[in-house]
Image (spheres, rainbow, N blue to C red):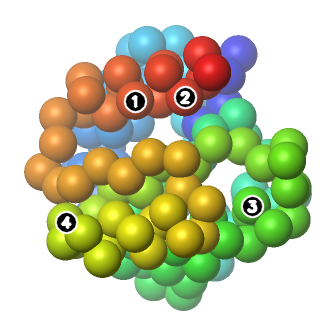
Amino acid sequence: MTNVLIAEDDPHIQLLIRKQLEVAGYRVWATLDGEEALRHALEQPPDILVLDIMLPGKDGLEICRQVKEHFGAKAPPVIIISARGQEMDVEAGDSVGADDYIIKPFSPRALLEHVQALLDR
């Protein structure tokens, strides 16, 4: 079973994402906190991470950077989700190694398609 780590501090958005992925057959571990997400990602690497940028403790960009540095070429794909949609925000995601950047609001179904596409690569 494919494991997905979600770090999203809005419980409603987190629940929407979680339910969409679980219905699609993914095993989901979710947190509202960036420090907890990073710790989990390094100790029990998921197959893919879905990270909000604005998180308490450690932001999603920093989590992405540390996961990519820690695992190198074997790092799991990372999707950044954020209300920040300016070009410089997307470039910030690229600069830390994010594999995809989705701007809020988004449909949970569209996120599922992005997850599946990255896992199929």
The residue that mark 1 highlights is: 114
Q: Which of marks 2 and 3 is nearer the N terminus?
A: 3
Tell me where residue 42 appears, x and y as whole percent.
Answer: 82, 60
Q: In this view, does 106 lie above or below 105?
A: above
The residue that mark 3 highlights is: 68
* Foreground of the two, 42 or 75: 75
* Left or right: where 33 falls relative to 43: left
- Structural distance between the alpha carbons of marks 3 and 4: 22 Å
The residue that mark 2 highlights is: 118
The residue that mark 4 highlights is: 85
Q: Residue at x 49, y 79 (%)?
A: 59
Outermost residue to the bottom: 57
Tell me where residue 78 appears, x and y as whole percent.
Answer: 57, 49
Asked if disc 3 and disc 4 are in contact, CB closer than 8 Å, the reply is: no
| Location of residue 110 (image quadrant) | top left
Q: Residue at x 86, y 65 (%)?
A: 70
Q: Residue at x 19, y 66 (%)?
A: 85
